[in-house]
Amino acid sequence: MRTIALLAIVLGSVEGCVRTMRGGENTLLPLKPKEIAEIALMPKSWDWCERGMCTSSWNQHIPQYCGSCYAHGSLSSANDRIKIMNHKLKYFGPDVMLGRQSFLNCAPGHGLSHGCEGGEPADVYEFMHKYGLPDETCMHYSATDSEKYLIKYNGTCPPEGYCMNCMKIPTSPDKPVCFPVTKMVRYRAKEYGRIAGELAMMKELKNGPITCGIACNPPFINDYIAGIFHDITNFTHIDHDVEIVGWGEENGVKYWRARNSWGTYWGENGFFRIVRGINNLAIESDCHYMVPDVSDEELVWDEKPVYGGGLFGIRPFSPEKIHREVNDTSDVTSNHDKLKKHEKRIISLAKASQDKKIYGLMLAIVCFMAALAIIAAKKLKQRRHYRTLD
């Protein structure tokens, strides 16, 4: 049993949730008297979910482990902000759930994040700012990243990695085939930025949910089930991202309400509350917001739309009436000349990841062999002991 436990510890250390930190932000300056006064004038509570403006929750680790918390936290916030914006525009259609897998497939090839090996909300919003993201009907979530394209595409994203369809088509009437979809509605980040501190967070939350880094210590990961979490260990190593949907107060205790990405069976239906105003678990020190751009929707869902949809993507009803053309996905997918400068980095990252796994496996084998040697030595000692007794 000890041998098995040792192996579990070794193998468990090979993979870990990674949230990269460019600036290492986890501390805050004390509030000024003016800021304290402003906070006192804020509403006692504010919650976008209670206002009916929250979309569905996600689980980043299904169907397998993937360290994509930064993508889930930032895209959950973006989903909800798109819902808020559409509500203001009097569009009450289905919720938009942005393409997590499209991001994980394509962003690392542009130097934005390490896919399932970690990243930052700024990577997600920069990708949305430059290229946009389709909704999740383009690509279901598989908890993988661009590493699967390393051999064939040098780690860059093929067109079918961004959006695809699988059906019988005129050129294959008897057998379904899969093919890339190159024109679709893309959702972009008009702007994005970083904020920190209780007051700045509350002000920005008035515009919509935000994404914040959090330092997940064992009590939070293993022991939290409900209520207002309060860490007393002063743990500040940020390694996770969550969506903040609002704030409140209960029995004199101020709190943030946040959504995790570990499924609805975790915490308070997938959410949690944590004390507010003391930067508990560094949750107030590294937050991001974004302003969505939903202008592509107008081309398809306007009272007089100029685009309609088909098996191969959206297309204009009449080319003569197009006032803004929808471009294909060549700007984001397998453009090898454009992405050539990233190839060495992608390959080195993949090699480092592979070396890490090999090292972990070799270490596990060494530990296993050492354990067997110890067991064999004990048995040999026992035999000698019995012989002495005889």
Image (cartoon, rainbow, N blue to C red):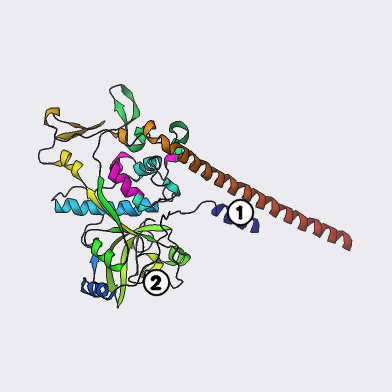
Mark 2 or mark 1: whose residue is earlier in sequence = 1
- Indicate whether 225 appears above or below 345: below
Mark in the foreground, 2 or 1: 2
**Which quadrant of the figure contains the N terminus?**
bottom right
Asked if the magenta segment contains residue 137, the reply would be: yes
Q: Rate crowding at label 1 as few (under 14), some (14 to 19) or many (20 or more) other CA atoms within 10 Å.
A: many
Q: Amino acid at mark 1?
A: Leu
Residue at the spot x=76%, y=58% of the render?
A: 378
Which residue matches tag 1? Answer: 7
Which residue matches tag 2? Answer: 230
Q: Quadrant of residue 298?
A: top left
Q: Quadrant of residue 107?
A: top left
Asked if the magenta segment contains residue 30, the reply would be: no
Q: Residue 21 appears at what percent x and percent y?
A: 42, 56
- Describe the element under mark 1 as helix, strand or loop: helix
- Describe the element under mark 2 as helix, strand or loop: loop
Magenta region: 123-146
| Closer to us: 252 or 37 | 37
